[in-house]
Image (spheres, rainbow, N blue to C red):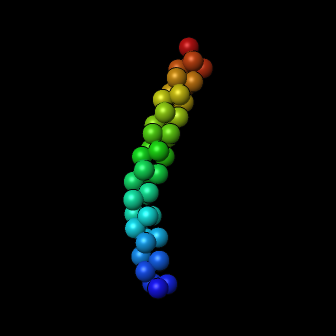
Amino acid sequence: MKYQSLMINLLRLHFLLPKVCCLVISMISSLHVHFQDFILYLSA
């Protein structure tokens, strides 16, 4: 029974992970864009 719940948790993680990764990647990319704008603003 414990093994089954562990498998269910692993499946949940497996489905959640891509969503979390996408969220993190989008956050980092948007931060990167803001950072580039900031550097351009400083160098101007």
Between 14 and 28, the residue placed more toward the observer is: 14
Q: Position of residue 21 (x, y in %)?
A: 44, 51
Residue 15 to residue 2: above or below: above
Residue 28 to residue 19: above or below: above
- Residue located at (49% from left, 84% from top): 2
Tally the numbered discs. Answer: 0
Q: Position of residue 22 (x, y in %)?
A: 42, 46
Between 17 and 30, the residue placed more toward the observer is: 17
Asked if residue 30 lies left or right of residue 15, the reply is right
Q: Position of residue 14 (x, y in %)?
A: 39, 63
Q: Which residue lies furthest to the right in this view?
A: 42
Between 31 and 26, the residue placed more toward the observer is: 26
- Residue located at (56% from left, 14% from top): 44
Residue 34 to residue 28: above or below: above
- Residue located at (47% from left, 77% from top): 5
- Residue located at (43% from left, 57% from top): 17
Q: Residue furthest front?
A: 1
